[in-house]
Image (tube, rainbow, N blue to C red):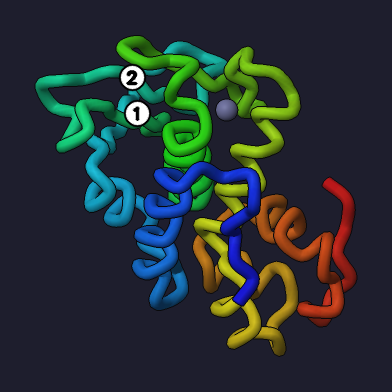
Amino acid sequence: MDNFLRPQFTPKQKEELAFIQRAQTQAPVNIVGIAKLFGLGVWEDHKLPPGIAAKIFHDPKHGGRLGYSIVIRGQDSRQRKNFSVAHELAHYILHRDKFAGSSLIDDSFYDSGLGVFKEADANALAVDFLMPWHLILEYAHLDIAELAKKFDVPEGAMRLRLQDRPEAAKTPALAI
Ligand SMILES: [Zn+2]
């Protein structure tokens, strides 16, 4: 299927992404479980400073097999938390050389300072993690709001998913 395996990925990245694909067995995709199985710690924090959505940081003690933890904003909706975990997991796979031994902090707009192209890449991969086409197509009879509910993601994220293939849903895709 679709596959988020793109030609520019390294063999290591392809291997990591194949692991995630194998875990995308049903909707909603259990992204927290997948991130943990992948080897990262995942934590909620109710005291993240205002304007911070999530972060990923070097955490040798509690950071799972890989020694990194994802922290998400405790006050966010479950749907937004899912997107935050997916976005940080994508940063780990794509950009970990940029924050090795350190941290990456995303603001409310998922801007970590890595630049718009890297953020767009992380968002695109997060969308692939949470809303893989092989599962979306099983529910092609649903509209965007129903799909977002089924996949436990923000509606804006579902619109992002469908904007390149709007015929996959009854409701025309909207620009975010
Ligand atoms: Zn980011």
**In this rendering, would 61 be left or right of 140?**
left
Q: Residue drawn at (40%, 44%), measured in percent from left and top?
A: 12
Q: Which mark is residue 57?
A: 2
Q: Is residue 82 above or below residue 143?
A: above
**In this rendering, would 35 be left or right of 174?**
left
Residue 160 drawn at (x, y percent): 74, 54
| Disc 1 secondary structure class | strand
Residue 34 drawn at (x, y percent): 31, 55
Real-space CA distance between mark 1 and mark 2, rounded to the nearest whole angstrom: 8 Å
Question: Within 10 angstroms of label 1, few (less than 14), some, or many (20 or more) residues?
Answer: many
Q: Is any part of residue 76 visible from this angle?
A: no
**Label 1 belongs to which residue?**
71
Locate the N terminus and report the quarter of the image it occupies. Answer: bottom right
Q: Residue drawn at (52%, 59%), measured in percent from left and top?
A: 130
Q: Residue drawn at (45%, 45%), measured in percent from left and top?
A: 13
Q: Residue drawn at (60%, 66%), measured in percent from left and top?
A: 3
Q: Are marks 1 and 2 in contact (CB under 8 Å)?
A: yes
* The quarter of the picture showing ligand 1: top right
Q: Quadrant of residue 8?
A: top right
**In this rendering, would 166 be left or right of 11?**
right
Q: Residue furthest front?
A: 11
Q: Amino acid at mark 2?
A: Phe
Q: Amino acid at mark 1?
A: Val
